[in-house]
Image: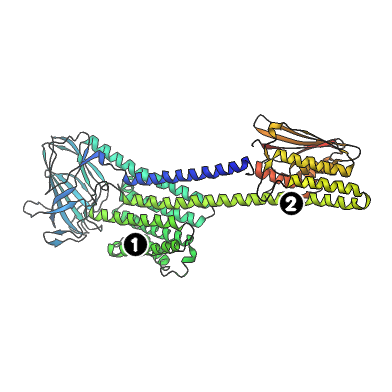
């Protein structure tokens, strides 16, 4: 609980600490985004610009780094046989042959061909090559010797057996000059040819490079899985269950897509998966991403979706996804002429929807809009990189898709942090208002009693009534130094001053029958305490404990070894019977709801005090009493102040 004096300082420190931690969290997530996107494995390989199908490595030390075989290879289109009598053209590797012009002919997505590269090595010996994604079947030849095949190449779809498994190929070079030929057929994928880079090198550095690249991919998947759990749990705790589920589905679908498009992790784990199955999983995962984002945005801004011109997309996206899942792989469903327009229409729809929310200054529309724009731009750049191999300094190894996904989730993480802060602030205000209301309930009860006593004395003892009015004035002067509408706590000294004023007021009425003793060390008087916790206990001692003669009341404040205060109010009055004590204990047990009344047969505000102590300090009153011998009521609070 937070209150006056040191409580106010605690409140300020908590706010500053929360804001600082939130900024640190956002900085950490942004750093992860940048690292995951920018993390380059370039220092593990050497990159040359291959020209006219030849690469000279005779002066290069291949014992430490692999070599990336990017550049212009020779290409023999429309054949899988001996290329000696064929006329070669040039083609960029990596990259799809779709849309490329070879020997004056524009190639389609399906076809056959032979890639050729001549390499001059530093020396004969054991070497290794890594081939990741060559669609959709290939055979590797080195110096006209067949080294390995992936699937089975064929001149048409019926004779081709597709395979998408990445391979590390070990071979022995018995001479310095190598002629690398890769015979490729593609009748199952939309992009044919060598789509991802090919590497060559000594076995140890190339294997190390392979492991580092794999660890990078696994790291991204781990980060994504962690963020999925984080967003899911916290949105669920904030009672935003629909948004939580949509974000979780989005993260899982991205995780699956990432395991396919970079490093083919899914294919490595499940090598028996057919290429049709992998294609189905990949396209379905992208559609699930699109659909989950759509439902997520509609759940955030439902009022913008009632008359939205693109609201039919919800049904269409779900239908198209169901068709992809249920029907076998048919080229028309997976063709870029169908899939790309669907992505484009959805992207435009979401853009205008979020832009509209941003224009109307909807809650958290800013970070959502920024995150989505970065995600959209990253996806476009990733597609361009796959199609055209973006080879710009510092960006050749940049994974745009990873960066875009994590930045989008960063935006949702920021929204979540703001929601948590708002919820904390609203809970804090509600908590303080509840305590203020409970404390306000006690004040009228006490004042009504005093005013009633003054009213009764006006006819019998005017002088005493005047004295009581003066004492009441002193009492109120002490009491209203504290304003329960503004503060929640005040100092123990103020509560004891209130008790002194109250007992003095009662002594006017009772002809000095009350004897009050306070045992409280001066160094503890500045401790924070809930207002009107001790005074109602003293009032109960007088109202229910006084029998005749004198009533001695002792208030004691002690510090325990675990840095807590024990405050007790003890009297030598008539005490409480065991039956009544059991009733009091049951009625004053802290519950989830505030007590319905601040009064009971046990006295003024016992259940009220118990409830406030419980929600503020996780404490409660301990009542010890013996019939006709007296009562002791104590409670503990943290020492602070």
Expressed as whole percent of the image width and height from the top left, the position of residue 329 reads: 31, 60
Residue 442: mark? none
Q: Residue at x 5, y 53 (%)?
A: 85
In front: 400, or 73?
400
Q: Is residue 92 left or right of residue 35?
A: left
Mark 1 surroundings within 10 Å by alpha-carbon count, few (fewer than 14), some (14 through 19), many (20 or more): some
Residue at disc 2, secondary structure: helix
Give the numbered dot on residue 343: 1
Residue that protrudes farthest toward the left in the picture: 85
Task: State the image coordinates of residue 612 (x, y, percent, origin top left).
Answer: 69, 45
Q: Please identify, in this view, whether the residue under mark 2 or under mark 1 is nearer the observer.
A: 2
The image quadrant where one finds the C terminus is top right
Residue 503 figure quarter: top right
Q: Nearer the viewer, residue 96 or 508?
A: 508
Residue 298 is situated, as x and y percent measured from the top left of the image, at: 46, 62
Relative to 333, does residue 442 appear above or below in the rendering?
above
Locate residue 78 relative to residue 525 in the image: left or right. left
- Which quadrant of the rendered structure holds the N terminus? top right
Residue 622 visible within the image: yes
Q: What residue lies at 63% left-to-right and 41% top-to-bottom?
A: 5
Q: Which residue is mark 2?
A: 441
Q: Earlier in the sequence, mark 2 or mark 1?
A: 1
Distance between mark 2 and mark 1 Cα atoms: 61 Å
**Circle 2 crowding by C-alpha within 10 Å: few under 14, some 14–19, many from 20:** some
In which quadrant of the rendered view does residue 173 lie? top left
């Amino acid at each position: 609980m937070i209150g006056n004096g040191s409580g106010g300082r605690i409140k300020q420190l908590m706010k500053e600490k929360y804001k600082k931690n939130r900024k640190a969290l956002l900085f950490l997530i942004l750093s992860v985004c940048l690292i995951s996107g920018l993390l380059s494995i370039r220092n593990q390989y050497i990159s040359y610009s291959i020209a006219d199908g030849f690469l000279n490595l005779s002066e290069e030390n291949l014992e430490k780094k692999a070599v990336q075989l990017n550049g212009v290879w020779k290409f023999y289109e429309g054949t899988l046989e001996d290329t000696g009598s064929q006329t070669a053209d040039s083609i960029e590797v990596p990259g799809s042959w779709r849309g490329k012009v070879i020997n004056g002919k524009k190639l389609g997505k399906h076809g056959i061909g032979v890639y050729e590269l001549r390499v001059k090595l530093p020396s004969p010996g054991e070497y290794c090559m890594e081939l990741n994604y060559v669609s959709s079947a290939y055979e590797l030849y080195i110096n006209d010797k067949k080294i390995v095949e992936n699937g089975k190449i064929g001149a048409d779809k019926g004779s081709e057996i597709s395979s998408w498994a990445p391979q590390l190929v070990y071979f022995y070079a018995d001479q310095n000059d190598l002629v690398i030929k890769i015979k490729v057929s593609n009748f199952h994928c939309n992009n044919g040819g060598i789509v991802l880079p090919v590497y060559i090198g000594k076995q140890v550095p190339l294997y190390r490079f392979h492991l580092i690249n794999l660890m990078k991919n696994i790291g991204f998947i781990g980060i994504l899985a962690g963020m999925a759990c984080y967003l899911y749990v916290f949105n669920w705790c904030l009672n935003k269950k629909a948004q939580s589920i949509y974000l979780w589905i989005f993260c899982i679908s991205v995780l699956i897509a990432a395991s396919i498009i970079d490093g083919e992790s899914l294919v490595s784990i499940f090598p028996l998966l057919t290429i049709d199955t992998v294609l189905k999983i990949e396209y379905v995962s992208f559609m699930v991403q699109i659909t989950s984002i759509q439902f997520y945005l509609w759940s955030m801004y439902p009022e913008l979706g009632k008359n939205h011109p693109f609201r039919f997309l919800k049904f269409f996206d779900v239908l198209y996804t169901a068709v992809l899942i249920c029907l076998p792989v048919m080229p028309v469903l997976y063709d870029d002429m169908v899939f790309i327009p669907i992505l484009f229409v959805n992207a435009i729809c979401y853009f205008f929807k979020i832009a509209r929310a941003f224009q109307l200054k909807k809650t958290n529309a800013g970070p959502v809009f920024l995150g989505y724009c970065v995600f959209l731009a990253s996806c476009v750049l990733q597609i361009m990189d796959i199609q055209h191999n973006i080879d710009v300094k510092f960006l050749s190894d940049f994974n745009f898709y990873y960066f875009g996904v994590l930045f989008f989730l960063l935006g949702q993480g920021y929204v979540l942090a703001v929601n948590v802060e708002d919820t904390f602030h609203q809970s804090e205000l509600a908590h303080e208002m509840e305590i203020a209301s409970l404390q306000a309930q006690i004040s009228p009860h006490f004042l009504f009693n005093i005013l009633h006593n003054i009213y009764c004395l006006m006819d019998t003892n005017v002088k005493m009534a005047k004295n009581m009015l003066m004492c009441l004035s002193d009492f109120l002067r002490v009491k209203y130094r504290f304003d329960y509408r503004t503060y929640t706590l005040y100092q123990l000294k103020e509560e004891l001053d209130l008790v002194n004023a109250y007992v003095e007021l009662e002594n006017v009425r009772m002809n000095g029958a009350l004897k009050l003793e306070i045992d409280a060390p001066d160094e503890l008087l500045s401790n924070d305490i809930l207002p009107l916790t001790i005074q109602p206990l003293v009032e109960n001692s007088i109202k229910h404990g006084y029998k005749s003669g004198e009533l001695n009341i002792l208030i004691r404040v002690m510090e325990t070894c675990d840095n807590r205060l024990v405050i007790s109010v003890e009297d030598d009055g008539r005490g409480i019977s065991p039956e009544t004590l059991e009733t009091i204990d049951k009625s004053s047990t802290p519950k989830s709801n505030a007590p319905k009344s601040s009064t009971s047969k046990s006295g003024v505000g016992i259940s009220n005090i118990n409830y406030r102590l419980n929600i503020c300090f996780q404490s409660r009153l301990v009542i010890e009493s013996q019939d006709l011998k007296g009562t002791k009521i104590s409670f503990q609070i943290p020492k602070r102040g």
